[in-house]
Image (cartoon, rainbow, N blue to C red):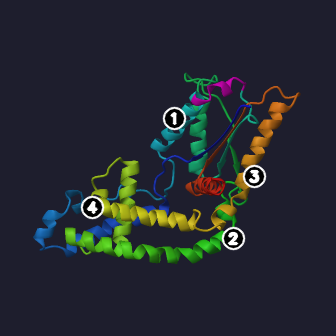
Amino acid sequence: MDFVFGQARHGTRAPTTKRIKELNNLENELKKLLGANVGNDDHLFSLPSWLKDWKSPWAAKINGGELIPEGEKELYDLGIQTKKLFSDLFIDPYNSDIYTIKATQVARASASAVAFGMGLFSGNGSLGSDRHRAFSVVTESRANDTMLRFFDRCHKYEDYKKDQKPKVEELKEPVLVDITKSVTARYGLKFTPKHISTLWFLCKQEASLFDTTDQACGLFTPSEVALLEWTDDMEVFILKGYGNSLNYRMGVHLLEDVVNSMDKAIYNKESTYIHTYTYIHIHILYIHTYTYIYTYIYILHTYTS
């Protein structure tokens, strides 16, 4: 039986609108900190040069969260690699029932699905010099998407998340306070835990979007980076991972789609009336949805080992 079921997160995106506001505000906060430090020449000497006149790269943006060119290329390349890996599955003419691509209705996910499909079907059509072809991407209304955006449709989860977020922040606080003291001592600026949290987010954005690790990331020692990564892991564990069974039980519709896809492939294979049984089923989704999948796989592995 020829069958591929794939799940991929959308490609690299710009910070969300909320995060852009936070980063733009950081620029003003740094100016205040530097202004309050005038006259303390010893510490000004120890400050990284980029910090003294840092400007937010997102200052001119109003909206965020969109797929960026690097993200487009990631999914396009993934489509090409998928085609190479399963080249024998692409001998049949294109049919949307055979080659199914599903994505959420949010722009970065559907755009990622298009980029993936362009790579997957490149050379198989008659459009342009690269012989692209038209293909279908199925999306569900955000108001009714219980398969790929189940976390938005589960009211119990919304209540759970609202209840747990303050507790997560309490668990983070001791780590952020200790790191704040260390970074303040190193650079002489009166950082707050909120500053450190935003600088850590900036570090991750610079590393993923600009391939830069010697600015915001350079403010932290390796041990501090490890602790900050622990706070991220802890938050995912509690709010998205197997720290609570609701986090994976609410994704039953997605699991049901996996099983139904396999059943359909088996039926097509065994049917005497259907000669084409190749079946490729791809989901382009969010990190939250993706977390559900590997959480569930981990639990199954734990209970069957």
* Viewer-proximal residue among 30 and 263: 263
Q: Secondary structure at mark 2?
A: helix
Residue in view at x 55 percent, y 31 percent = 80
- Labels 1 and 3: the sequence-earlier one: 1
- Labels 3 and 2: the sequence-earlier one: 2
Eye-nearest disc, 1 or 3: 3
Q: Secondary structure at mark 4?
A: helix
Residue 261 in view (yes/no): yes
Image position, residue 283 (x, y; %): 65, 45
Please give the residue where the numbered disc 3 appears in the rendered image.
256
Please give the residue where the numbered disc 2 appears in the rendered image.
155
The answer to whether 301 appears left or right of 75 in the picture is: right
Q: CA distance from mark 4 to mark 1?
A: 33 Å
Q: Which numbered circle lies on residue 219?
A: 4
The answer to whether 168 appears left or right of 286 in the picture is: left
What's under tag 2, amino acid-wise? His
Does the magenta portion include 120?
no
Please give the residue where the numbered disc 1 appears in the rendered image.
77
Does the magenta portion include 89?
yes
What's under tag 4, amino acid-wise? Leu
What's under tag 1, amino acid-wise? Asp
Above or below 11: residue 56: below
Q: Secondary structure at mark 1?
A: helix
Residue in view at x 20 percent, y 59 percent = 48
Please give the range of residues in magenta.
85-93
Eye-nearest disc, 3 or 2: 3
Around disc 2, counting alpha carbons within 10 Å, would you say few (fewer than 14), some (14 to 19), or many (20 or more)?
few
- Labels 2 and 1: the sequence-earlier one: 1
Disc 3 + disc 2, Cβ < 8 Å: no
Q: Which residue occupies the extreme front position in the image? A: 305
